[in-house]
Image (cartoon, rainbow, N blue to C red):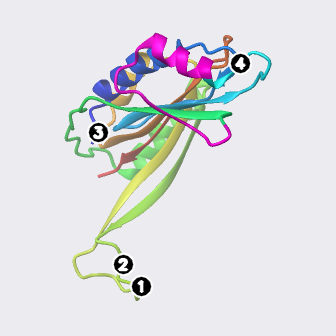
Amino acid sequence: MADVKALFNQCWTNSFQIRSIQVPGWTMGTIVCTPKNISTSWRLTDTKVGRLSWMNFGLKQYQLINFKVDVDSAGTGATGSMEFKKIPMKASKPRMSADDLANDLKEIQQSTGLSFQYSRQTMYDPPNRPDGSKPANQKAYTYFSFSAVSPYAPQEWVTFFEKFSGLEILKLEYTPSGDASNKWKYEGRIYAE
């Protein structure tokens, strides 16, 4: 699993650079970080001032190294992405039972006042055969999928997330709204023992 602190640091640093890009007539969409890359999109919102040439000029001005941008065939939308530097993997053996983990997640949901959702899931390894039968050596793994929406940046969540063994962060999203309602969304899994 990707090291939480390294992932959050790379996401924060790169999203800070990307969200500073201002292109006249274009609006930036959600910035998405995964353990492999960061990406975002833009759409043309004001055809009086927005031009494709402004998009190209704006991206050159910010000099984001290895940030690749593709423009759609209509010239009114663009997507950009960049691979992260290699994020170290960190072994994190689950130490909590499914019931204890469920109780901790309920407590977080009740005490934070944030939008925090979770659901209990089961994964089988190896998976069932095509005919639906189970292999003899199949094991069931319980995990909780979660998503949390917060105004707090990734650095403020590192200590919180690192307390969970068996944690896998799948995605972080940042929605730049241009006002105080900017939000971060954290999605992942926490495996039970």
In primary-sequence order, the first of circles 2 and 3 is 2
Tell me the amino acid under the disc marked 4.
Gly
The part of the chain drawn in magenta is: 53-74
Q: Circle 3 is placed at which residue position?
A: 165
Of residues 113 and 2, which is closer to you in this image?
2
Q: Secondary structure at mark 1?
A: loop
- Of the image marks 2 and 4, the number of the one nearer the N terminus: 4
Crowdedness of circle 4 by 10 Å Cα count: few (<14), some, many (20+)? some
Marks 1 and 2: in contact by CB < 8 Å? yes
Circle 1 packing at 10 Å, graded few (<14), some (14-19), many (20+), is: few
Q: Give the residue number, with chain letter if any, for mark 1.
A: 132
Circle 3: is it few (<14), some (14-19), or many (20+) Cα within 10 Å? some
Q: Is residue 160 magenta?
A: no
Of callouts 3 and 4, the N-terminal one:
4
Please give the label number shown on residue 25: 4
Q: Which residue is mark 2?
A: 128
Q: Is residue 185 left or right of residue 160?
A: right
Q: Could you give the CA–CA distance between mark 3 and mark 4, rounded to whole angstroms?
A: 45 Å
Q: Are marks 4 and 1 in contact (CB under 8 Å)?
A: no
| Disc 2 from disc 4: Cα separation | 51 Å
Q: What amino acid type should be assigned to the residue bearing mark 2?
A: Asn
Mark in front: 2 vs 3: 2
Q: CA distance from mark 2 to mark 3?
A: 27 Å
Going 75% across and 25% down the picture, which residue do you hit? 45
Q: Which amino acid lies under the numbered mark 3 shown in the image of this protein?
A: Ser
